[in-house]
Amino acid sequence: MREEYLLIRFGELALKGKNRKEFERQLRENIDHAVKDFPHCEVRRTYGRIAINLLGEPAEEVIEAVKPVFGISSISYARKADLSEEEIQQTAYQMFSEYKDRKTTFKVEARRSNKDFPVHSTKLAPSVGSYILHHTEGIGVDVKNPEVTVEIDVREQGAYVSCGRINGAGGLPTGTGGKVVSMLSGGIDSPTAAYLAMKRGVTVEAVHFHSPPYTNERAKQKVEDIARALSRFGGSINLHVVPFTRVQEAIRRQVPDDHTMTITRRAMLEIVTKIAEKEDAKAVVNGESLGQVASQTLESMNVINEVTSVPVLRPLIAMDKEEIISIAKRIGTYDISVRPYEDCCTVFQPDSPATKPKIGLVYKYEKRLNKEELFEEAIAETKVISVSNAKSGNKEFEDLL
């Protein structure tokens, strides 16, 4: 049996110039973490890519483990052939013949970084193609739009032969973009925003506001499950669960109904800012989409933002609901988010919230609250839960073979 590998290709890392080595080092570290449940796997970084020697580990399961890792553009299952033209031909034919769905057109692409190998890549590709064509009935060559591309990469240690690519998660490796605090309500939007921020390489500290008895333990569990789903993409996530009942009750008692939402959002952002400072996070991420609800008008955002000097990132700002739902379904958070448990954003929702709140009125109403004491108490009683994703099963590998 020939040695089996996964070939990991980079996307944006190729554009990172002087920082490329650091980005590749971080990606290698993240892949090591992703395959920790497969002790025999050997992860190596070499010549602008990463190769995983499977050493008997199940390829389909390892692929599922590394697919969510940000920074990977594509993954190929490959077999290593000895450095002889005949061996490469036989390996390529074997890979092609095992392809699950029989295709009728193919092409061969060859690269030769090992210049000691005597057959030039421009001759190796047609040689291998002819071998496959001669040994397989009912197929043809199509160099412009093939159904299958057989790839051969001739290196110092052998020739890696693969058939087909699986798309990776793209983006930048988690850990290369600093740290952010992401507000996680339990709805559809905020997990999607956290995912998109993570895709740009940031590490996420999640914050959830919990208001028992108005919100129950199932609502909190829902958010833990969302954080667990997100941890597939960026490793373990610290979930800060902030007790918010006293703050909300004080706002409900002291503030006119139409301004409760604005002042509640300001309170949340103020508390999140304090957590960000404590965690040395450089930005706050939320799931706001312009115009989607009353608190997400430009006027409301401006008034709410006024409480913080920390940058507030809004990855969903120009998306409509259907676009957001589509991403949520793809990343596995949608079905969790639609569980019918209320969060603190919905339990005291006013009938007619102000869409153009006035900062003067907001100051006036906030003076009625003992904000400093309420916020310090909430932060002091915050519980931090470390959430990580369990080993996942296989899925898309069957599309390769």
Image (tube, rainbow, N blue to C red):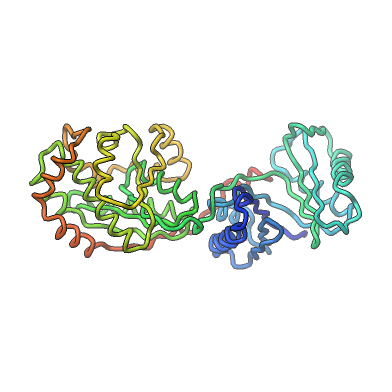
Residue 208: percent from left, percent from top: 29, 53
From the viewer's perspective, tell me whether residue 351 is left or right of residue 43: left
Instruction: Write the residue at 25% across / 62% down.
Output: 382
In the depicted view, which residue is nearer to us: 335 or 284? 284
- On the rendered image, what quadrant is the N terminus found in? bottom right
Where residue 206 sits, quadrant-wise, is: bottom left
Instruction: Write the residue at 54% across / 63% down.
Output: 33
Farthest residue in the bottom direction? 39
Q: Taking 382 as reference, is 300 above or below it?
A: above
Where residue 150 sits, quadrant-wise, is: top right
Residue 214: percent from left, percent from top: 18, 49
- On the rendered image, what quadrant is the C terminus found in? top right
Farthest residue in the right direction? 118
Residue 288: percent from left, percent from top: 34, 40
From the viewer's perspective, tell me whether residue 284 is left or right of residue 260: right
Instruction: Write the residue at 39% across / 53% down.
Output: 227
Residue 386: percent from left, percent from top: 37, 63
How many discs appear? Answer: 0
In the depicted view, which residue is nearer to us: 314 or 165? 314
In the depicted view, which residue is nearer to us: 158 or 341? 158
